[in-house]
Amino acid sequence: MTDTSPGSPGWASRIRELSEVEPSPRRAALFRVADAIRVVLHRMVQSSAPNEVIEAAAADLEAVADRFKEYANKSIYEGFAESANAGEPLGFFDHSPMLGRANPLAPPINLWLEGDHMVGTATFGAAYEGPPGCVHGGYIAAAFDEVLGSTQSLSGSPGMTGRLIVNYRSPTPLETELRFVGWLERVEGRKIFTRGELWAGDRLCAESEGLFISIQPGKFAELKDERDRRAVGDEVEGSA
């Protein structure tokens, strides 16, 4: 069985498969919901709508939120192993805060493997604005963490972020297709060194260095089990 958990050796191949799989009706519906929420987010932060329009939108969104209320909350990792075994890339890929088409917080980043480089494209809308007309630096750092986190999987060793350095070279524009490139630099024992660049056309916007520390097999599962135990404890406390 190939491990396809985030950061694992099979992570890069799973990303490649993601672009080749026709989404199921459920996934397609989730994508529609997330896309609609993204539009709301980007339009809302710059809206000049009058108060009555804003009040009506709030009521509509509260009604939408109520539709999901009765259904159990699940982690983005729930069902990850099952979906990997079934050959359908769900779980983290769809709901990642940076890659996830079904996560309205994600731009999302479209990521794939080109030779020995991880390449990604993304367009950041108005909700990501920092300096006027530019992407907030914190989102750029988060995007690099995701891109280089996928890049380090090329080492063949699962790893977690140990250090991330971002050098901002020029303003990163909003509403522009951006291109990320990440590559594996070297491996020293458990340390995995990666580098990446962010481009807007032919202009370099930022560079990044990522250090990842390989983890022991099963550590990812341990983290998930601990998260599940906390969730059960919160449910018990909430029902007391």
Image (spheres, rainbow, N blue to C red):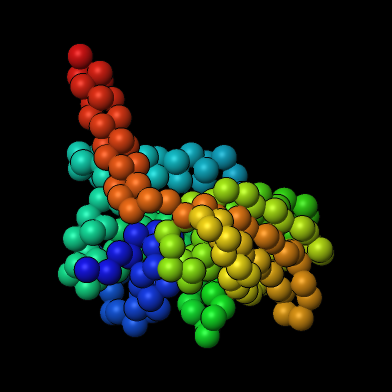
Residue at (30, 64) in percent of width and height: 3
Number of residue marks? 0
* Front residue of 88 and 61: 88
Q: Position of residue 202 (x, y in %)?
A: 76, 81
Q: Is residue 76 above or below residue 199?
A: above
For the C terminus, the image quarter is top left
The answer to whether residue 195 is visible is yes
Q: Position of residue 18 (x, y in %)?
A: 36, 75
Residue at (30, 58) in percent of width and height: 91
Figure quadrant of residue 87: bottom left
Q: Position of residue 34 (x, y in %)?
A: 40, 59
- Residue ranking furthest to the right: 170
Residue at (39, 68) in percent of width and height: 9
The answer to whether residue 100 is visible is no
Left or right relative to 4: residue 202: right
- Residue ranking furthest to the top: 240
Q: Is residue 45 above or below residue 174?
A: above
Q: Is residue 193 above or below residue 215?
A: below
Left or right relative to 204: residue 228: left
- Residue ranking furthest to the front: 189
For the N terminus, the image quarter is bottom left
Q: Is residue 230 above or below residue 188?
A: above
Figure quadrant of residue 2: bottom left
Residue at (77, 52) in percent of width and height: 131
Q: Position of residue 215 (x, y in %)?
A: 42, 51
* Front residue of 34 and 197: 197
Left or right relative to 164: residue 156: left
